[in-house]
Image (cartoon, rainbow, N blue to C red):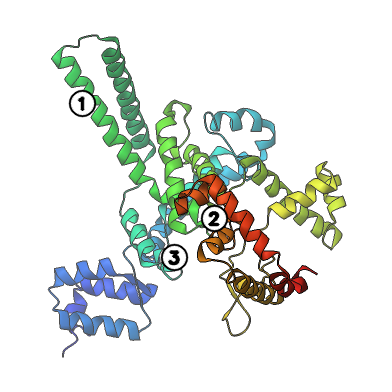
Amino acid sequence: MPRTAVAASPERELTPTPLDQLLDRGRAQGRLSLSELREAFAKAGVSPAEGRSILRELTEAGVDLGAESGPGVAEATTTSRTPARKTRRSKAAASRKTAGQTAGATGDTARDGAPVDGGAAESVEPDAESLAGEEADDSGTLDLDDTSSVMGDSVHTYLKSIGRRTLLTAAQEVELAKRIEAGLYAEYKLETALEGGDKLAPGVRDDLEWVIEDGRRAKDHMLEANLRLVVSVAKKYTDRGMALLDVVQEGNLGLIRAVEKFDYTKGYKFSTYAMWWIRQAIQRGFADSARTIRLPVHVLEMLSKLSRVERDMHQRLGREPTPEELAAELDKTPDQIEELLRTSRQPISLDSTIGEDGETRIGDLIEDVDSPEASEVVDRQLLAEQLKGVLGNLSPREAKIMSLRFGLTDGKPHTLDEIGKHLGLTRERIRQLEKESLSKLRHPSNTRPLLDWAS
């Protein structure tokens, strides 16, 4: 088949088509996204057979065919934004020089309304400008091909779906925040009027309901545009006992909270503010769900602090610190440190396998202290047979009464009333029959087989 797209004629080389330009760029960069190829194939009218031939030749030439928003597109975008990034990073570096002098005022303003988990979050808050630059990079680009190699199809599908959302500019964030604020205020006014029994004019109520609905649409828009920010934060917590999608869902709860409490008048980017809510929600999610046995938040914070101190002391001393050394460093007693270390252990399933064959369960190696010894089981069986033989010397009704009275049938002794109701006799008659049966059992012919067991 003629290679119309790859081996072009001399006339086409003089006036290259968009498809030729795209393929040349792919050979130069070593990568093309599938969305670009599909669009170019559609414009050039390439048949499926010709398209497969072109893709095969590109693969043989070493061109990597990426996903919808692969690094090829990100690389082209990054090239055009390099000067702006360098300027922003240089400004962030300059601002870090004065962070020690202005940490109190700037840090408090940036975190207004956003709680920080002191035990699990960083001890020093970065300045808002540098953090905003890092967040823009993380939220703007997701290497979907890289994540798909270690995650399931459902995760990759979710990342692709949120990758199609357009990022917001600072002006758009302010506009959406104003609409959200107006919607919340209109909802408050409407609820206040309804609770107070005030009658609203039809036009006023319709206007309030429209503003409320518009605020909800703005909230959804801001949430969807910042879902990538949640993923960029959640990817740093994938090795702590929770699946990535579960971590993302916890972070989404924090994002919702950030959207509701964002104050655009502070002048900071939304990503700067939302980052703290997302981290806190993820850390709270780990506290509630990551462990089989839930630990209180203050215990998890203490464990995090203990882990940091233990790591620092190991680097200083060149060995594992003792509980006494950790206690002195944390102003705790050695018993408290040992209790924390025991608390940090994760439970192990009894069904988990060990050994080279992988067929031995841990539960098979643990002794059951409640189970009787084999010799005891045999002795009880022999004794039960001896008692059965002795009771055989009584009448069936007397044997039944003795078995129920002393729990020989079901292991539970019964009262005279219970036995009487069971046999349809009075309590006094059951007592008389019990007395007669005991007299018969005390005869030497009946007691002799049981003397060995009594001794």
Q: From the image, tell me which residue sits under label 1.
A: 210
Q: Secondary structure at mark 2?
A: helix
Residue at image point 82% right, 42% down: 332
Residue 177 image offset from top left, x and y in percent = 36, 31
Q: Residue 408's spot in the image, x, y percent?
A: 59, 63
With 170 as the anchor, is 341 left or right in this view? right
Q: Would residue 20 be found to the left or right of residue 202 on screen?
A: right
- Above-or-below relation of 369 to 182: below
Foreground: disc 3 or disc 2: 2
Task: Say left or right for 374 vs 27.
Answer: right
Q: Residue at x 30, y 75 (%)?
A: 24
Mark 1 residue crowding within 10 angstroms, few (<14) / some (14–19) / many (20+)? some
Q: Earlier in the sequence, mark 2 or mark 1?
A: 1
Alpha carbon of mark 2 to alpha carbon of mark 1: how far?
Answer: 40 Å
Give the side of residue 4 with respect to residue 393, left or right.
Answer: left
Say what amino acid the circle numbered 2 marks.
Tyr
- For mark 3, what is the residue? 147
Q: Which residue is mark 2?
A: 237
The amino acid type, in three-letter code, at marker 1 is Trp
Q: Residue 248, percent across and down? A: 44, 52
Label 3 secondary element: helix
Mark-to-mark CA distance, 1 and 3: 41 Å
Considering depth in this image, is 76 or 152 the residue closer to the camera? 152
